[in-house]
Amino acid sequence: MDIKGYIKSRWDEHSENYENIPAHGIKSEKDKKVVKEALKEMLENRKKVLDVGCGTGFVSLILAELGHEVVGIDLSEGMLSKAREKAEEKGHNILFKIDDAENLAFEDNTFDAVIERHVLWTLPNPEKAIKEWVRVLRQGGKLILIESENKEEKTANHHYSEEIARKLPFGNGIDLRKFKKIADKCNLTLKIRKLNCERINLMIVCEK
């Protein structure tokens, strides 16, 4: 099995109890409020937004609540199934579909914003992914990353085999120096702000 196939299978397995895994499920109304207020500030008026690696739909649902047109993608059909159930329960019309964060099936300049939450650490080719996200952004659009800062202990080791974890450049969180180099290559402006959340506490906002 290739690395993408392995990662997909692991998240399909996790889909049933994903929100009970530490740092994934948002059980705190405070954390949801922090993220929602930050996104409201970043995205004024109605936008067409791509939620990359949407999982069970936490960010997609917040974006829909804020009035945006949302497309959520993920490699895992198990995750997408949960996201669809949640959206239906809340009456939100969100398009959820399988797609690869590093090889998007969208035309150039499709979205006003691209957002991801805790996804970069799972990607074997994060630079390729970021270039794809920029490609589908309209000029002046925003790329918003909600991530964890670099840690000594690799996040990837908790979910994947050691062999796979070694192949993930951001497997222990975002190294901001490395990320800035990628942003510079993509001609992105870069702003960093802290979120007062329990675990995932970094918001990186880039503009095309």
Image (spheres, rainbow, N blue to C red):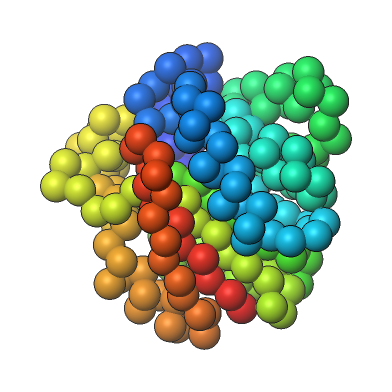
Residue 40 percent across, percent down from the top left: 66, 52
Q: Quadrant of residue 110?
A: bottom right
Q: Position of residue 123 (x, y in %)?
A: 42, 51
Of 67 and 120, nearer the camera is 67
Specify the quadrant of the image occupied by residue 159.
Answer: top left
Would residue 53 be seen by someone viewing this image from the given angle?
no
Q: Is residue 169 left or right of residue 208?
A: left
Could you tell me residue 4's position as x and y percent? 46, 43
Q: Looking at the image, is 115 positioned above or below residue 33? A: below
Residue at horizontal 30 percent and vertical 33 percent from the top: 160
Is 172 situated above or below 136? above
* Residue at 65 percent of width and 22 percent of height: 82
Image quadrant occupied by the C terminus: bottom right
Residue 75 is left or right of residue 138, and the answer is left
Q: Position of residue 48 (x, y in %)?
A: 79, 57
Q: Nearer the viewer, residue 135 or 51?
A: 51
